[in-house]
Image (cartoon, helix red, strand yellow):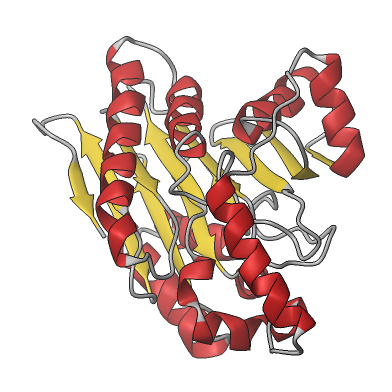
Amino acid sequence: MKAIIVHGGSGRFKQHKIERAKKGVKRAAREGFRILLEGKSALDACETAVKVLEDDPVFNAGTGAVLTIDGRCELDAAIMIGSSYEAGAVGGVERIKNPISLARKVMEETDHVLLVGEGARRFASSIGFEDYNPITEERLQEWKKLRKKLEAGEDVRWKKIRTLIKKHPELLSGTVGCVVLDDTGEIVAGTSTGGVFMKLLGRVGDTPMLGVGTYATPYGGASATGLGEGIMRMVLAKTVTDFIQMGISAQDAAQSAINLLTDRIGTGAGVIAIDRRGNIGYSKNTPDMPVAYIKDGMDEVEVFI
């Protein structure tokens, strides 16, 4: 059984971006599934799908990711193999195009799981990643507007992020993720993000933390999205995979985990999942979360928002 599901972040997408987001996740799922049809691994398919999303500026990952309070672009990503529990991740890395590919290199070419900041950037440079500026003009203009509000004393500081997100829920959307099952039964999960707009320099969210934003086991895999601080407190991705291992369906596992998060923490979030039989699951407690999936027996990619 081959199956792939991707998400483009939970939160609220501005109306003019919804169709772009739906097309983006559909393209990513299609490209990832094409890799599976060519007989390549779930790892290759997951990386490919996430790269498609990172390269699409409508999403908050890679090109077009959001900016820190001082106008920098710090990126997080993780990828994990279910059968072996191998994983690689990067946090707060700057000036690279595809952090998901760097996370894979951390897994394959180092003895570590997570590299952050300047160390991650130097590692990228040493293995041939080109210097790349992921900041788009659209994100820069958004940052300038929020910066003016900050300087005027309005409530847009990172320590007031809950208030900011209530006023501007579109700032929360955009993290991307993917879970894949290939014909060998391998499950791989990957997630990539720019974090939350106006975050403090050095802030790392849930995405590169195993079991929190990204997790895969022999039984299932999950990728989360939303306000990372709340997701961290619930260890959301592992909660989903634990439910799957207990025999709960992928859909019920995703929904139950989001229900717990909503009841106990109140954070806006979403999650996608796949189990070892190719069943998919997804859930959110936010207005939007673009999702696309396809598996054996389907003629076309299914897309939801």
Pick the front one: 29 or 82? 29
* Quadrant housing the N terminus: top left
The answer to whether 125 appears left or right of 297 in the picture is right
At 12% from the left and 34% from the top, the residue drawn is 300
User: As displayed, is residue 64 above or below residue 140?
Assistant: above
Residue nearest the viewer, comparing 191 with 235: 191
Quadrant in which residue 97 is drawn = top right
Residue lying at the far top in this picture: please name it: 38
Q: Which part of the image, by quadrant, shows the C terminus?
A: bottom left
Residue 196 makes an appearance in the image: no
Residue depicted at x 72% and y 27% = 107
Q: Nearer the viewer, residue 67 or 24?
A: 67
The x and y percentages for residue 113 are 78, 37
With respect to residue 125, does 190 lie above or below? below
Q: How many marks?
A: 0
Residue 303 shows up from this direction:
yes
Q: Is residue 298 above or below residue 272?
A: above
Residue 237 point in image, percent of width and height: 54, 58
Please name the residue shown 48% across and 43% down the image: 57
Q: Is residue 59 left or right of residue 213?
A: left
- Give the vertical position of 186 relative to 261 (above or below): above
Task: Give coordinates of residue 60: x percent, y percent.
Answer: 53, 51
